[in-house]
Amino acid sequence: MAIPERSARRAVVVVLAITIATTLIYMTVLAASKPTWVPASSQTVPAGYLHEQQHAFNATDNIINNSTDPWECTCYSYDSDEPLAEKPDSKADAGGAKDPIIVPESFGDPPAELMSKINKNFVEGRVLLIATANYGMRDYTYNWIESLKKTGVDKFLVFCLDDKLYKHMVNAGYEENAATIPASWLDLDVAAGFEDYFSPKYRIITHAKTLVVQRLLYLDVTVFFSDVDIVFLRPRMIEFVKTYMDIRPETHVIFQQEGLDTRQVNSGFYLIKPEYDMKRMLAQTIYLQDSTEGLTQQGAMNRALDDMVKDIRSSSVVLLDVMFFPNGFAYFDNNLSKSRGVEPYILHANFRVAGDKKKELVNLGMWYLDEKWLKKVDAQVEQSWQEQVDTITPGNSS
Ligand SMILES: *[C@@H]1O[C@H](CO)[C@@H](O)[C@H](O)[C@H]1NC(C)=O
Ligand SMILES: *[C@@H]1O[C@H](CO)[C@@H](O)[C@H](O)[C@H]1NC(C)=O
Ligand SMILES: *[C@@H]1O[C@H](CO)[C@@H](O)[C@H](O)[C@H]1NC(C)=O
Ligand SMILES: *[C@@H]1O[C@H](CO)[C@@H](O)[C@H](O)[C@H]1NC(C)=O
C-alpha cells in the first residue's frame, strides 16, 4: 500500500509546481501587456464647460466684493510666512455683519400632532426629509414620493402650503407623511396653482421654504430639504450625503449647486444641521428677502452665504458634485452626467418651467406618477372640498 501512496504524493507535487509556474508566467505576461495604472490622459474630462458658464447664474449679482477681510473673501490665498489669520468666532462676529439680523433664541412648541409626525418620520438619528408644496404642485409631489419609494425611502414629511393639498394627501393615504404649516409659522397666504420661476407668488412659496426649515432647526432637527421637482434615482442617497456631513465636523450644510457655477447654491436641495451659524444664515435669508424687492429665496440665501467663511479648510458650507447631483442646466442642457457615464443620485428638473419640466421627466422615464390614480383622488377631493366651501361661505346656501 506504500507505493501508490508515494506516487500520489509525487503527482500532487508535480501538479502544484505546474500551477505555480503557470500563474507566475501568466502574471508576467499580464504585467508586460498592460500597465497596472491607467494613464491620466485617457481619463481626462475636458473642463471647458466649467469656464464658459461662470457668469450665467449671477441672478443676485453677488460677486464677492473687494473685501479686506480674508475670511469673507474668495480671493484669499496664503503665500507668505505670516501666520494664518484666526478664524473668527461666528457668535462674536454676529453683531458685525452688514445686515441687522436678529437670530431668535427659541420658538414656541409646535402643535402636538405635528410634533408626532416629525418624530415618526426621522430617517436616522434626527434627520428629517421634507418638502414644501401646494395643491397646484401635487402631481410633482406624488412623482417625488414615487421616486422615494423606488429608492427605498419611506419616511418623509411634506409641509402643505394649503389645506387642499393636505386633504388630498390624506385621501391618497399619506396622512402620516403630510402636515399643514402652523399659522404661527407663516404670515402669508399662498394661493394654489403651480408657480413659475420669478413670479410674485413663487416668491411667497419660497419664503415659506425658509420658515419651515428655520423652525425645524430650533427643534434640533437635521433637515434634508428637497424641492418636489426632484427625483431620487439611487438607493441610500440620504445616507451618502449624511456620511459626507458626518466625516467633517465643520460641515453644517451641504447644497446642490446651481447651474455649473460653484459660486451659487440651489436652495431646493440641501442637508442642514441645527447649528448657530445656520440659524443665523436662515434669519438673514428671511431678512434679505423681506427687505429686497424682487429677490428670490434662492437669491437671498446666496447673499446670506456671501457673508460666511468660504475657506475650504474651515467653511461650514459644502457643495455637492454637479455630476452626481445635477440640476436641470447640467443634466438637460449640458448632458453632463450621461455623457461622462455618471449615474446620478438625483435629478433636479429645474431650469424648465410649466409643461416643459414634466415633459423632460416623461421623456427620461422619470415620470412615475399614475395619472389615472391622481384623477381619481382629485375627484374625491374636489367633491368634498366643494361641499366644505359651500358650508362655510355665507350666502351660498340660498
Ligand atoms: C454676471 O456678472 C458679471 C460680472 O458682474 C457680468 O459681467 C455678467 O454680465 C453677469 N451675467 C449675467 C447673466 O447677468
Ligand atoms: C462693493 O464695494 C463698493 C465700495 O465699497 C460698493 O460701492 C459696491 O456697492 C459693493 N458691491 C457689492 C456687490 O456689494
Ligand atoms: C481692492 O482693494 C485694494 C485696497 O483697497 C485696492 O488696492 C485694489 O485696487 C482693489 N481691487 C479691485 C479689483 O477693486
Ligand atoms: C448624452 O450623452 C450620451 C452619452 O454620450 C448620448 O448617448 C446621448 O445621446 C446624449 N444626449 C443628448 C441629449 O445629447
Image: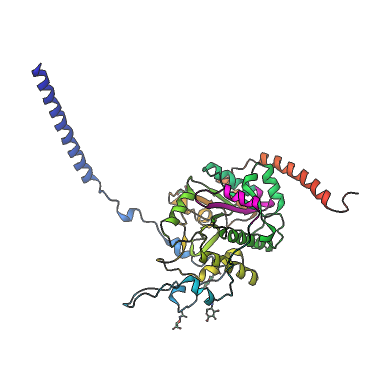
- Residue 202: x %, y % from top left: 66, 60
- Residue 18: x %, y % from top left: 15, 32
Q: How is the image coloured?
A: rainbow
Magenta stretch holds residue 202: no
Q: Which residues are magenta?
A: 110-138
Please state if 235 lies on the left or on the right of 349 as rendered: left
Q: Is any part of residue 244 visible from this angle?
A: yes
User: As rendered, which of 119 and 134 lies closer to the eye?
Assistant: 119
Magenta stretch holds residue 119: yes
Please state if 182 lies on the left or on the right of 269 as rendered: right
- Residue 289: x %, y % from top left: 62, 68
User: As rendered, which of 33 and 173 lies closer to the eye?
Assistant: 173
User: Which part of the image, by quadrant, shows the N terminus?
Assistant: top left
Q: Is any part of residue 365 visible from this angle?
A: no
Residue at 35%, 53% (x, y): give it. 43
Residue at 42%, 67% (x, y): give it. 314
Quarter of the rendering containing residue 221: bottom right
Please state if 44 lies on the left or on the right of 375 as rendered: left
